[in-house]
Amino acid sequence: MKALKGTVLNILALALLLLASSITIANASQTRTPFYLRAIATAINVEWSHQADYSLVIMRVTEEGILNNTQGLTVGTWTIDVIETMSIKSGKGTASAQFVMNFYSGATIEGTMTAKIQYYIGTTLPPDVDGKFVGHGDMHVIGDLHLIVEGINAILVFDGYSW
């Protein structure tokens, strides 16, 4: 009787392992598509800011604008709500935000991002932004975030993949 019970338990354990490995393989083999969008701000609003101890600035900024794909075509709009903290002395800061992307196709992605920011104090150069983003909705997205400047436009670049 004990041998039969042991055999049944071994078969059950083996079946569970096979099921778990097939789920893992299915998740690992999801189709991943490159995701690259350029978010160009058309409106920026500093909701509030606070300076602490003459060395730290904390602010809330909302932005909205258009989304361009790799061909430069406008494919939708975006909004972002950012909380940014910056040291006036070192020029280093952090940002965390929530974003919404609305595509002209009707798809929507909502997500979050975080970034380390380095301002070059005393220069007119844009800040160096090194961040990450993740979003969910009609598609899932994840990737890196950085800032580029073209002419007078500071453009937030979402560079990753979707599935």
Image: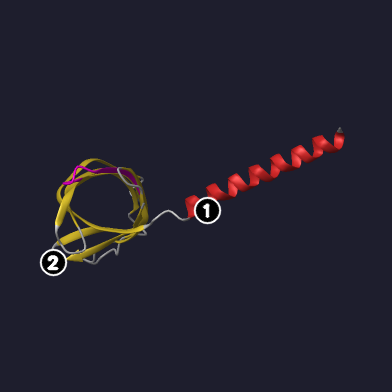
Distance (Cα) linking label 2 and label 1: 46 Å
Residue denoted by label 1: 25
Task: Give neighbour class at mark 1: few <14, some 14-19, many 20+ (Cα, 10 Å).
Answer: few
| Chain part drawn in magenta | 103-113
Q: Where 55 sits versus 122, above or below?
A: above
Relative depth, front residue between 59 and 50: 59
Label 2 secondary element: loop
Residue 92 horizontal/vertical position (percent): 36, 57
Amino acid under label 1? Answer: Ile
Task: Give the dominant element type of the magenta stretch: helix, strand or loop.
Answer: strand
Residue 84 sits inside the magenta stretch: no
Label 1 secondary element: helix
Amino acid under label 2? Answer: Gly
Within the image, what quadrant is residue 35 found in?
bottom left
Q: Is residue 57 left or right of residue 42?
A: right
**Label at residue 151:** 2
Relative depth, front residue between 20 and 12: 12
Q: Quadrant of the N terminus?
A: top right
Residue at 24% over, 64% down: 148
